[in-house]
Image (tube, helix red, strand yellow):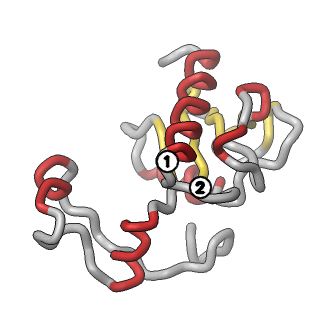
Amino acid sequence: MVPIYQLRRDIIHVCQRMYQRGYVAANDGNVSARVSEDRILITPSGMSKGFIREDQLILCDMEGKVISGNLKPSSELPMHLMVYRERPDVNAVVHAHPVVATGFAVAGIPLAQCVLPEVVLTVGAVPVAEYGTPSTEEVP
């Protein structure tokens, strides 16, 4: 496993890049990383990703209990935990709202169609999920 101090730096770097490139606006999105089999670091709720500091990240267990940190974890924590439980091979989760991808999703166009062939060739097909109200059981 990667040392926790490096994971903190990596999460902040990803958050800053998401913000700088317009993949998130205001307080959108969230990022987490697996620290160990039973711990994750996650971004706080209600904070712009462009301005988060390492000391503001929250350490949680796999049940969602805060182990350390003074802020509230992302409201999408249950979704992150589900990914880690279902996919033990996954070590990080990034949830962003890029404008173009959001437009495709609203239009019901999966990124598997040849509208953007370079995406399909480099990333693979990106399916469209049905809309779910954020921070509810509609979004696990």
Q: Position of residue 89 (x, y in %)?
A: 37, 37
Residue 29 is labelled as 2
Tell me what residue is drawn at x 71 percent, y 59 percent.
Answer: 75
Tell me what residue is drawn at x 63 percent, y 72 percent.
Answer: 134
Q: Position of residue 44 (x, y in %)?
A: 74, 46
Q: Position of residue 128 (x, y in %)?
A: 34, 74
Q: Nearer the viewer, residue 124 or 115?
A: 115
Please state if 52 lies on the left or on the right of 37 as rendered: right
Please state if 8 lies on the left or on the right of 126 as rendered: right
Q: CA distance from mark 1 to mark 2?
A: 8 Å
Q: Position of residue 9 (x, y in %)?
A: 59, 22
Amino acid bearing label 1: Val
Q: What is the secondary structure assignment of the residue under circle 2? A: loop
Name the residue that disc number 1 marks: 94
Please tell me in which quadrant of the rendered image residue 52 appears.
top right
Tell me what residue is drawn at x 77 percent, y 55 percent.
Answer: 46
Residue 105 is labelled as none
Amino acid bearing label 2: Gly
Q: Residue furthest right?
A: 70
Tell me what residue is drawn at x 21 percent, y 50 percent.
Answer: 123
Q: Nearer the viewer, residue 105 or 35?
A: 105
Q: Earlier in the sequence, mark 1 or mark 2?
A: 2
Q: What is the secondary structure assignment of the residue under circle 1? A: strand
Q: Are marks 1 and 2 in contact (CB under 8 Å)?
A: yes
The quarter of the picture where the C terminus appears is bottom right
Please tell me in which quadrant of the rendered image residue 33 appears.
top right
Query: Within 10 Å of the Cα at label 2, are there few (<14), some (14-19), or many (20+) other Cα atoms?
Result: many
Query: Within 10 Å of the Cα at label 1, are there few (<14), some (14-19), or many (20+) other Cα atoms?
Result: some
